């Protein structure tokens, strides 16, 4: 019997928003805003003993991680989100009983499950699409100064140039001319590149970027990226705009007294007008939707590891830079785990609410352990030993350093776009740093990490253990 269905009647009202371009179809699960008939704790028939709460929690975990109807080998991410929202409502209605039960053990039994459900419940609210604990309009108002774009980058002259693949040289010249008039520590830096993993969140869906690093704008360092066309790229012919709408900003504040840098991120939209001008608004304002940035950005400034970097030739065409050329991103990526200190989302969300990081350091992974998770009899004992040694992601990906690498990336789900990063970093050899694993060993490493996080066959893993309070 599914106890949660017995304990409380939940009434949901569907309120489908209008989804324009901007959210990958597999992430279009922000489709309802939960409504509930508020019942007092007694009428809701909430669990009243630790034993009952433990049974409810275990059943609820099973309800979270059901298989996708279209692919039985993966979990339905939409189901996780919708069930989390329902469970958050249930726990909220049972809070009086839960927090005042005679045995305090009840609260600890569902503590992690409670925070996880609350964090995920924001995905399912039409006015919390950014995933924060304040509504979307309040977030935009609160961060207006921190996420503001420098005037030059909002000018029609620059916008028209950066939005035309034949005028990128003009866009670059505007920044070069600006740099001639300021001190060295105030110069902006630019780069052209093709991303390995992330496309722009618009119909154009390009991997190309015109990147601008602004060292100080109103006290914040800003990483600003405009989607651009790249050589050989073929956009979807159905797109109404034959160019990218998106550009984004990541803003990082100075280190505060707690040793933390407050960080924010936001997508903007270039809205192309019939008179040829470009109107800039936020993506949320332009297409009435966005998604939780934490899906991809476990820290707001995400390390940039281009597939290709470009220069502009004399005619303004993008040409590949020679492999091994010095890169602007070598120094910028060092800031994330260096000069920025610990990154904070300013209390708008807590990364650890999304669960533990993959690759905990306190797990003993001997040859037998790795062979069982890799399921590859061709790997030698030496290879298995190397793979086990590489499964220590949380030595860096933890709170206070690079941030936890947690849900949803490590969960093998039907949302391929949020898993591409983890697989891409491992299979390309970028992670873990300095490794010399073969392709077969990297494939086994990825398989072991995701199986260890959540094994869909056994319905076990470090995520389940954490949800149970372990």
Image (cartoon, helix red, strand yellow):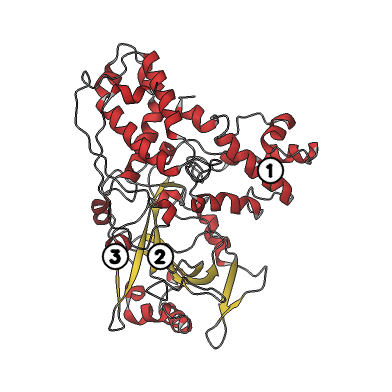
**Residue 142 against residue 3 in the figure, above or below:** below
Where is residue 48 shown, x and y percent of the image? 31, 14
Query: What kind of element bears circle 2?
Result: loop
**Residue 61 quadrant:** top left
**Residue 86 quadrant:** top left
**Residue 102 quadrant:** top left
**Is 327 placed left or right of 184 in the picture?**
right
Pick the residue in front: 76 or 220. Answer: 76
Taking the view exactly as shown, the residue that stands out farthest to the top is 102
Q: Which residue is mark 3?
A: 286
Q: Which mark is residue 444?
A: 1
- Give the crowd class for mark 2: few <14, some 14-19, many >=20 residues within 10 Å: many
Distance of mark 3 from mark 1, alpha carbons? 43 Å
Query: What kind of element bears circle 1?
Result: helix
Where is residue 150 shown, x and y percent of the image? 34, 70
Q: Which mark is residue 202?
A: 2
Looking at the image, do the residues carrying marks 3 and 1 touch, with CB atoms under 8 Å apart?
no
Distance of mark 3 from mark 2, alpha carbons? 11 Å
Where is residue 84 shown, x and y percent of the image? 37, 36
- Give the crowd class for mark 1: few <14, some 14-19, many >=20 residues within 10 Å: many
Q: Residue at x 34, y 25 (%)?
A: 4
Q: Residue at x 32, y 78 (%)?
A: 155
Distance of mark 1 from mark 2, alpha carbons? 34 Å
Where is residue 462 shown, x and y percent of the image? 54, 31
């Amino acid at each position: 019997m599914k106890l949660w269905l017995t304990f409380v009647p939940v009434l949901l009202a569907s309120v489908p928003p209008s989804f324009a371009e901007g959210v990958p179809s597999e992430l279009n699960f922000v489709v309802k805003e939960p409504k509930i008939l508020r019942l007092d704790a007694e009428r809701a028939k909430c669990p009243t003993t630790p034993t009952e709460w433990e049974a409810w929690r275990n059943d609820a975990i099973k309800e979270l991680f059901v298989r996708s109807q279209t692919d039985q080998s993966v979990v339905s991410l939409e189901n996780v989100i919708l069930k989390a929202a329902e469970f958050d409502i249930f726990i909220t209605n049972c809070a009086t009983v839960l927090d005042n039960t005679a045995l305090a053990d009840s609260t600890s039994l569902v503590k992690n499950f409670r925070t996880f459900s609350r964090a995920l419940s924001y995905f399912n609210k039409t006015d919390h699409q950014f995933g924060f604990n304040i509504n979307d309009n309040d977030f935009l108002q609160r961060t207006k100064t921190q996420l503001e774009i420098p005037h030059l980058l909002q000018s029609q002259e620059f916008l028209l140039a950066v939005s035309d693949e034949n005028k990128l040289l003009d866009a670059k010249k505007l920044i070069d001319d600006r740099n001639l008039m300021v001190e060295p520590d105030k110069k902006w830096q630019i780069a052209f590149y093709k991303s390995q993993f992330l496309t722009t969140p618009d119909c154009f869906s390009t991997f190309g970027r015109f990147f601008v690093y602004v060292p100080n704008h109103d006290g914040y360092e800003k990483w600003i990226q405009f989607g651009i066309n790249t050589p050989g790229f073929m956009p979807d012919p159905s797109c109404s705009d034959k160019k990218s709408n998106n550009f984004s900003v990541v803003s990082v504040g100075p280190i505060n007294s707690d040793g933390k840098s407050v960080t924010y991120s936001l997508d903007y939209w270039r809205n192309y007008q019939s008179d040829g001008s470009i109107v800039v608004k936020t993506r949320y304002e332009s297409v009435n939707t966005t998604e939780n940035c934490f899906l991809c950005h476990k820290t707001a400034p995400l390390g940039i590891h281009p597939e290709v970097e470009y220069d502009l030739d004399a005619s303004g065409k993008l040409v590949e830079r020679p492999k091994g050329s010095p890169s602007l991103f070598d120094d910028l990526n060092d800031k994330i785990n260096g000069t920025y200190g610990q990154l904070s989302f300013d209390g708008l969300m807590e990364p650890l609410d999304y669960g533990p990081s993959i690759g905990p350091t306190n797990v003993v992974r001997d040859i037998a352990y790795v062979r069982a998770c890799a399921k590859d009899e061709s790997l030698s004992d030496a290879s298995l030993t190397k793979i086990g040694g590489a499964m220590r992601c949380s030595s860096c990906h933890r709170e206070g350093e690079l941030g936890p690498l947690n849900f949803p990336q490590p969960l093998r789900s039907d949302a391929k776009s949020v898993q591409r990063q983890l697989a891409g970093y491992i299979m390309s050899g970028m992670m873990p740093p300095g490794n010399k694993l073969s392709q077969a060993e990297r494939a086994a490493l990825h398989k072991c990490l995701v199986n260890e996080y959540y094994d869909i066959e056994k319905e076990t893993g470090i995520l389940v253990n954490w949800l149970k309070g372990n």
